[in-house]
Amino acid sequence: IFLHWVSCPRKMAQPSQPHSQSYIRNICIIAHVDHGKTTCADNLVASNGIISRHSAGKIRYMDSRTDEQERQITMKSSSIALQWRSAADAPFYTANLIDSPGHVDFTSEVSTAARLADGALVVVDVVEGVAAQTRTVRRQAW
């Protein structure tokens, strides 16, 4: 899986105080269908200790609806707040992670998630490469 960060054109303020809005980032995961968005989200959730590293990628934590679990496809965007810091003495950031669908039938979900985000994490399958929906969701994020 290849990851690429797409930053929105607006400038983000540098944090000055813990727990202020400048320490909160909204990040959307976008990609072509079946390129690993939910697996990437599971691994980020596991990094916060919410699920085990062993079950990341299998549990589909962000796909909470029964029909999503049965079909193994994300149909609705879902979000979770994760904590991150760059060093032991650095302040914590809150990353509101939004896992969006990749299937073309759910394009409106991707558009909405991208509008809410400060930036997007673009996931590309290294075997299949950049696909048609990868280009579409990237345009939606920009």
Image (tube, rainbow, N blue to C red):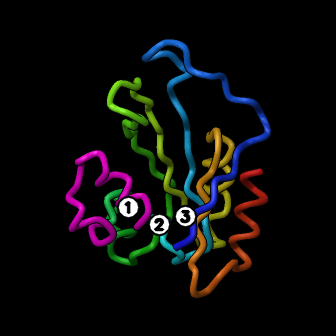
Check whether the beta carbons of the residues at disc 1 and disc 3 lie within 8 A of each other.
Answer: no
In the rendered image, residue 51 lying in the magenta stretch gets the answer yes
Q: 7 above or below 139?
A: above
Marks 3/2 in contact by CB < 8 Å: the verdict is yes
Identify the residue under disc 1.
Answer: 63
114 up-or-down from 96: above or below: below
Rendered residue at 55%/45% (across/down): 27
Q: Nearer the viewer, residue 19 or 16?
A: 16
As measured in the structure, the alpha-carbon distance from the residue carrying label 1 to the one carrying label 3 is: 10 Å
Vertical order, 136 against 47 (above or below): below
- Residue at the spot 54% in from the left edge and 58% down from the top edge: 100
Query: Mark 3 or mark 1, which is nearer the start of the sequence?
Result: 1
Q: Amino acid at mark 3?
A: Pro
Q: Which residue is mark 3?
A: 101
For residue 47, side relative to residue 68 (left or right): left
Question: Dot 3 lies on which element?
Answer: loop
- Compared with residue 74, is residue 132 higher up or lower down, i.e. above or below? below
Secondary structure category for the residue under label 1: loop
Residue nearest the observer in this picture, 1 or 41: 1
Q: Which residue is mark 2?
A: 74
The amino acid on which the numbered mark 1 sits, given as a three-letter code, is: Asp
Few, some or many residues within 10 Å of mark 2 (<14, 14–19, 20+):
many
- Place of residue 101 in the rendered image (x, y in percent of width and height, measured from the top left): 55, 64
Q: Residue furthest bottom?
A: 127
Residue 49 in picture, x, y percent from top left: 23, 48
Which residue is farthest top?
17
Whether residue 53 is in magenta: the answer is yes
Q: Residue at x 32, y 31 (%)?
A: 88
128 vs 103, nearest the viewer: 128
Residue numbers of the magenta segment: 39-59
Instruction: Decide: few, some or many residues near mark 3? Use Cα within 10 Å; few <14, some 14-19, many ≥20.
Output: many
Gap in Å between the C-alphas at discs 3 and 2? 5 Å
